[in-house]
Image (cartoon, coloured by chain):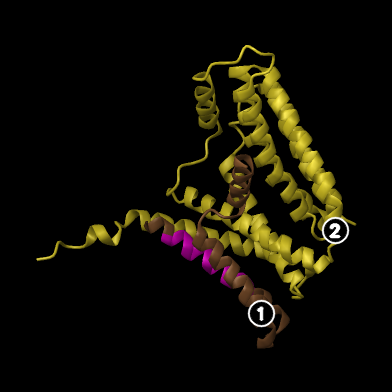
Chain colours: A brown, B yellow
């Protein structure tokens, strides 16, 4: 049982290091998947908006971590 | 199929797997030097066996999942995996986190194991468990990288990339018998973080039905975009470290 718990913790650690970064990333992905198709943006703009949000989340998280 | 098509998957798989293999090799070498090669190799083989079983068990199931759903799920996992690496690489490059040093890890692992008494049986259980855990965990990351970078039907290039990285690290390990400190691991992790994040973004877009301009070529633009964003992150980290936190600049009340 303990081995399974350790394995699951290690597996979780592969994807999540800083909780706020993971939550921010998932929230942005969910927003893009649910709302972007309803905004009727041109195809090229969809990818740019998606990327820009993720880049902003990364930069904000790094800056906040550096300030701690 | 040409290099422009298979190149990104092959290169991403090779570089990302290289980092994981170097990490596993560092621990296996430390265990081998301190506790003996027999136990180190036994643990390694056990890890490889478990990984092979996992791939054989779950690999075929992946082919039954519809492509768009697979791209979406793999894309999300890859994005979380990549952005986590990129964040750490940026904080390291900016001076907030200490650099990852294989020589230090090698020494730490060696010292940790030297302090424990070796068993008199043929196999040393601590050594076997340590290498088994290292190989299984780092190997799982390699398996995930291969699955992720092959999400667009690029399984063979991704497998070749990871296999080449594995062979290279094993050969170098056999020759040098020391941690591969000359591999610029931090730079590699930075580059791999950018590549994996770009792949994750791309696959989520594909899974969601977005039309990337230039199709696969958009991966290069995404990589360039994340590189620029990470440079901004490095700049801001350095700037933040030069400025004292707000709590220290406040004047005492009264």
Residue A37 lies in quadrant: bottom right
Q: Which image quadrant for residue A46? A: bottom right
- Mark 2 secondary-structure assignment: loop
Q: Which residue is mark 2?
A: B153
Q: Residue at x 75, y 73 (%)?
A: B213
Q: Decide: few, some or many residues near mark 1? Use Cα within 10 Å; few <14, some 14-19, many ≥20.
A: few
Left or right of B8? Residue B28 is: left
Counting from the top left corner in percent of width and height, residue B27 is at 61, 30
Closest to the observer: B101 or B116?
B116
Q: Chain of mark 2?
A: B
> At 54% across and 23% down in the image, what residue appears?
B113
Q: Which portion, as a residue range, is magenta?
A: A50-64
**Residue drawn at 58 percent across, 68 percent down:** A54
**Which mark lies nearer to you, 2 or 1?**
1
Q: Which residue is mark 1?
A: A34
Farthest right residue?
A: B1
Q: CA distance from mark 2 to mark 1?
A: 26 Å
Does the magenta-highlighted stretch encompass residue B91? no
- Quadrant containing the C terminus of chain B is bottom left
The circle on residue B182 is: none
Which chain is disc 1 placed on?
A
Q: Is residue B174 visible?
A: yes
Q: Quadrant of residue B221?
A: bottom right
- Disc 2 residue crowd, few under 14, some 14–19, many 20+, Cα 10 Å: few
Q: Residue furthest left?
A: B254
Q: Is residue B112 above or below residue A49?
A: above
Pinpoint residue B209: horizontal percent, then vertical percent: 77, 75
Extreme residue in the top direction: B120
Confirm whether circles 2 and 1 share one chain. no
Secondary element at image label 1: helix
């Amino acid at each position: 049982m303990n081995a399974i718990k350790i394995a699951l913790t290690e597996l979780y650690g592969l994807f999540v290091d800083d909780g706020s970064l993971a939550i921010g990333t998932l929230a942005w992905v969910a927003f893009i998947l649910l709302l972007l198709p309803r905004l009727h943006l041109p195809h090229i703009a969809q990818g740019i908006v998606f990327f820009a949000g993720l880049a902003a989340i990364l930069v904000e998280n790094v800056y906040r971590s550096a300030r701690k | 199929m040409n290099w422009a098509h298979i190149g990104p998957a092959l290169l991403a798989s090779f570089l990302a797997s290289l980092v994981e293999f170097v990490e596993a090799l560092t621990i296996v070498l430390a265990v081998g030097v301190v506790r003996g090669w027999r136990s180190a190799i036994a643990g390694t083989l056990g890890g490889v066996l478990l990984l092979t079983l996992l791939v054989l068990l779950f690999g075929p199931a992946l082919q039954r999942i519809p492509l768009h759903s697979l791209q979406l799920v793999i894309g999300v996992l890859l994005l979380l995996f990549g952005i986590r690496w990129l964040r750490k690489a940026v904080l390291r490059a900016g001076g907030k986190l200490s650099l990852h040093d294989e020589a230090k890890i090698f020494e730490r692992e060696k010292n940790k194991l030297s302090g424990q008494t070796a068993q008199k049986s043929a196999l040393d259980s601590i050594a076997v468990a340590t290498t088994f855990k290292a190989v299984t965990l780092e190997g799982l990351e390699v398996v995930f990288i291969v699955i992720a970078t092959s999400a667009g039907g690029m399984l063979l290039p991704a497998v070749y990339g990871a296999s080449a990285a594995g062979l290279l690290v094993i050969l170098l390990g056999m020759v040098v018998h020391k941690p591969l400190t000359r591999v610029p691991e931090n730079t590699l992790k930075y580059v791999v973080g950018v590549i994996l994040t770009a792949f994750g973004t791309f696959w989520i877009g594909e899974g969601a039905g977005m039309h990337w301009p230039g199709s696969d070529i958009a991966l290069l633009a995404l990589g360039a975009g994340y590189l620029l964003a990470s440079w901004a992150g490095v700049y801001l980290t350095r700037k933040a470290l030069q400025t004292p936190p707000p709590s220290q600049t406040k004047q005492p009340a009264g």
